[in-house]
Amino acid sequence: MTISVKEYRFDRERSSDDATLRYIVSNTSDDQEAIVALRGIAPLAWNGLQRGNPRLAQVGPTLWIAEVPYALGQFSPGLDTGDVSFSFQFGTESQRIRYALETIASVAAAGTPKDFENAINVSPEEDDIEGMEIAAPIARFTYDFRVPHGQLTEAYKVALLNLISETPVNATTWRGFPAGTVKIEGINGRESTDGDTTLSFSFAYKPNRTGVKVGGLPEVDVDGWDVLWVWYAKADDPTAKAIRIKPTSGYVVRVYKRGDFSVLGF
């Protein structure tokens, strides 16, 4: 069931330099899902004020009441200066694979070559699939910002620390990138009393993959930063009349928690 987020408009609070908007979030028992859905609805800016960190209170198994604070001076990159640059690098990283996409040709000194179902470098005893190292594509990119002195709040610094240390992969679509494909790899900054603050955000991108095939296993979808690992076991091959090591099951596992990238403010 789709998560619902609705503002309770009759309970707004507003002063000259801050405000609080209240929402009702329903159809989820998970606080992280509730926060992500809430941040997707609550605007980053409201009447000249910038959004702070939402607060949640669970009032039912799948029902939450939320408060979203707004205040002056919350961080938004380039809010006043508009000074931003973008750089990127498309490259490769080493990756070991055991199965090819397909076998283009096979030859044998005599008779018919054995069919290893796209396995690479099978041992002579056929009890191990050594595979090979390939250069797998990866994209990295960086956003650099300059913002006025005093605009970088302590709350924003804590939010960045929590994001990169606890939930470094995007939970929802962010700047056009599908959920699960972008990982924040580094944040560098310099703040001084006599000039603007500089911030640099580094990311890595891996596309989601559909229909991943390993040996005779059914196809499976793998999100960008999730991992597919395979259990291999010796199995009888009636065609070859031999015992061979084969993939018997596959598992898509999540090794990075996902977070709300809207806290970045851009």
Image (spheres, grey):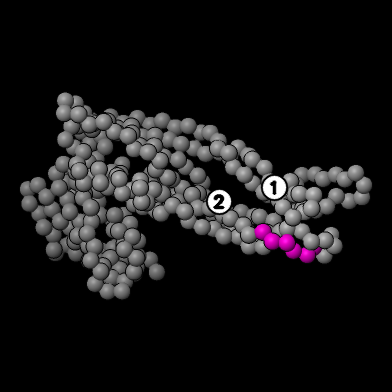
Taking the image as shown, residue 70 lies to the left or right of residue 164, namely left
Residue 163 spot, x, y in % from top left: 33, 48
- Left or right of 37? Residue 108 is right
Specify start and end residues of the magenta stretch as a single range. Answer: 232-237
Quarter location, residue 265: top left
Of all residues, the one furthest to the top in this rendering is 194
| Percent x, y of residue 141 | 43, 35
Residue 108: give x, y in percent of width and height: 87, 45
The kind of secondary structure element at disc 2 is strand
Q: Which residue is mark 2?
A: 209
On the question of residue 173 being in view, the answer is: no
Magenta stretch: includes residue 236: yes
Identified by mark 1, the residue type is: Glu
Q: What predominant SS class does the magenta segment belong to?
A: strand
Q: Look at discs 1 and 2 and give the one toward the viewer.
A: 1
Q: Which residue is mark 1?
A: 130
Q: Nearer the viewer, residue 85 or 53?
A: 53
Q: Amino acid at mark 2?
A: Arg
